[in-house]
Amino acid sequence: MLEAVSVKVFDLTPEQRDTVALLDRLLGTAIADRYTDFCRLSAGAGELRVARPIAAHALRELDSLLRHVLEVPMDAKAAEDQKTAELIEKAQQSLIEQGFDEPTIQRATKALKPRFSHKNQIRKIVTHLGLAPDGDVAKCWIALCDSAGKAYQRSFHHSLAVDDEFRTQYQQPLDTVIRAVAVALEGRYVVLMRRVEELAALPNRSEAVALFAGEIPGALPLQKHFFERLQSGHWLPHLARARLLGEPLADSASGDEMRFRQWPAGGFLLRMAASDDAVMRKGVADALRSVASSLHPDIHENGLEILAALPAEESAPLSDLAVGWLSRENRSFFLQAPENMVFWSSGASEGNHASASEAYSCWAHDASFPGARRQIRRARGHPGRSGHDCGGRRSAPG
């Protein structure tokens, strides 16, 4: 009979927690979460009996992702010249003529593209970060790349649990590298912001969105900088296809605490909702529909503001979204947008959109929010607007 596995109580060290917060702020949740998971696996937290190869995979994934994010802004990606591009194209054509399938051709194309070795790439990155290319951080990082594959070694006769040897050989060096890179990057963050500006200025919006989705991590400063620079609704279909208008990821550093102002796409959608182009406004409406089930307070607050900015005849058919966001179980503590929403709900066509006015009037009479109720009642008396009571009947303004 197998013995019960004792589960270790896991917690990050103070320095690791600080590193997670720094990674989350600079590079976003996806990278911060990978580092947290690696720390958890390395600590032996969990019931895994064969944790070593999984921890090794987490290490390689984190290393690869970090290099990928930094290679372009740190000039650590090999450039492809015209001659090389032509040779690769000829090789592709030759493989097609020989009957190779598409996946094989794609693998061959990728292998033929110029690239730096991991060692040279790491040295270029640390140099641009202001660290010595032959210093302790660079040597430690290169050694991790060279030796990580050994952690995948299989054995039928030895334990593959994470142990002190694994922690000494892999976790401690990675902690050193990640911490040093994050601290150095904080002082040179402008290079990532410049790359965002380059992408936002590209004339080919489809290419720009693809590069943004593939290169730029989900850090809030980078995401906000990108969306703030978009001034045309022609970006909408490309952003929607890349699924960049959806709900923001949960913040790694905040734990169970919900933070606000985490949806940069919301500001862009709000600007586009005021567009004179009906096609663009429809794109905004479609984007709101895609996040209708979200419980994130930013989606609720920004969504109501966006609905209020749309013309009445376009926003009223979306009243079910607002009603859902304002329901008791979903409602957050913000009132300005609901106040504005009364204007469009009561200003919608009186015959077809009575349900919107009725829904908002009922919400306005919710006794659990007397302050909000008073604000909305005042709003219903706004010159040129009229209201409805909870039964949908017209009532006198004021």
Image (cartoon, rainbow, N blue to C red):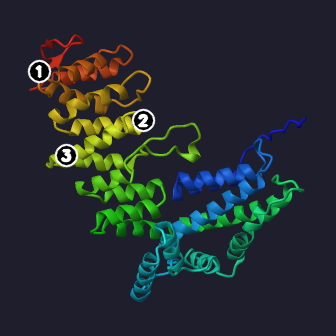
Say what secondary structure mark 3 lies in. loop
Q: Reading the chain from its start, which is encountered first: label 2 or label 1?
A: 2
Q: Which quarter of the rendered picture does the C terminus lie within?
A: top left
Q: Residue at 69% across / 74% down in the picture?
A: 142
Q: Amino acid at mark 1?
A: Gly
Place of residue 213 in the rendered image (x, y in percent of width and height, measured from the top left): 43, 59
Q: Which quarter of the rendered picture does the N terminus lie within?
A: top right
Measured in 3D between alpha carbons, the distance from the residue under mark 3 to the one under mark 1, in whole angstroms, is 25 Å
Q: Reading the chain from its start, which is encountered first: label 3 or label 2?
A: 3
Which residue is most to the bottom? 83
Give 221 or 109, whichever is nearer the viewer. Answer: 109
- Residue under label 2, please give it: 294
The answer to whether marks 3 and 2 mark residues whose Cβ atoms lie closer than 8 Å is no
Q: Amino acid at mark 2?
A: Ser
Give 5 or 302, whichever is nearer the viewer. Answer: 5
- Residue under label 3, please give it: 274
Q: Residue at 57% across / 69% down in the picture?
A: 67
Above-or-below relation of 244 to 178? above
Q: Quadrant of residue 8?
A: top right
Say what secondary structure mark 1 lies in. loop
Instruction: Find residue 351 and name its label.
Output: 1
Measured in 3D between alpha carbons, the distance from the residue under mark 2 to the one under mark 1, in whole angstroms, is 30 Å
For this view, does 122 lie left or right of residue 212? right
